[in-house]
Amino acid sequence: MTTYLAFLRAVNLGAKRKFPKDDIRRVVEGVGFTGVETYIASGNVRFDTTMRSRDRITQMLERAFLEDRGFDVPTIVFSASEFAELARETARLHAERPGLARHYVYLLPEEPPASVVEAVEATSNDLGDMVVRGRAAHALLRPGYEDGVVDPLGATKLLGIATNRNATVVTTLGEKWCTPAR
């Protein structure tokens, strides 16, 4: 069995995209995955499976979510070991920049090509930095950016499909769901 983490994009936003945690858990268990847990209402789920193909797992979950909800639910899947490394990198980047106002982590389905990485990182400015590491893009925002602005650096449109979580959620899930002594 391998442990995976899935991150659902744009659920529980507004009246038409509701997907309660209990329903997410039910659907993930319904496709045959075990050890299913959720964390907060933003669409974070961990599960165990004998399947090895991240693409097949993603497709299976997206089909099941669509069937259950009636709307597309883009889903970003990481193995627990991949996500553990992402969480460690998130903690490192955060620690290197004391005084950040916000640190958002955009989770990506695939590692972007070098040209996209370069374009995303080039959006860094006085408000903050964009740093891409593998399948994650970090928005490291300094005090002074306008709170509540979704994309203050103008980088997310370059990323394609992604879902974001704040650094606290990423590091918490890395500790909670990716440690060997589960």
Image (cartoon, helix red, strand yellow):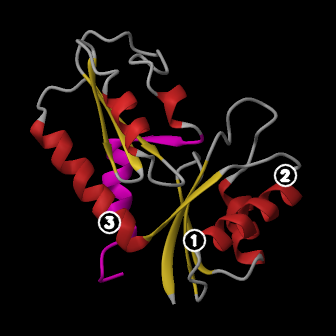
Alpha carbon separation for disc pair 1 and 2: 22 Å
> What residue is shown with label 2?
69
- Percent x, y for residue 97? 13, 33
Magenta span includes 35: no
Describe the element under mark 3 as helix, strand or loop.
helix
Identity of the amino acid at label 1? Arg
Q: Residues within 10 Å of mark 1 (few under 14, many from 20)?
A: some
Residue at the image position 45 percent from the left and 18 percent from the top: 154
Residue visible at 88% across and 59% down in the picture: 67
The spot of residue 76 in percent (x, y) is 57, 56
Dot 3 corresponds to which residue?
Answer: 84
In the rendered image, the vertical position of residue 175 relative to residue 14, given as above or below? below
Q: Residue at x 27, y 14 (%)?
A: 127
Q: Secondary structure at mark 1?
A: helix
Q: Give coordinates of residue 146: x percent, y percent.
A: 38, 9
State the mark number for residue 54. 1
Residue 162 falls within the magenta-colored stretch? yes
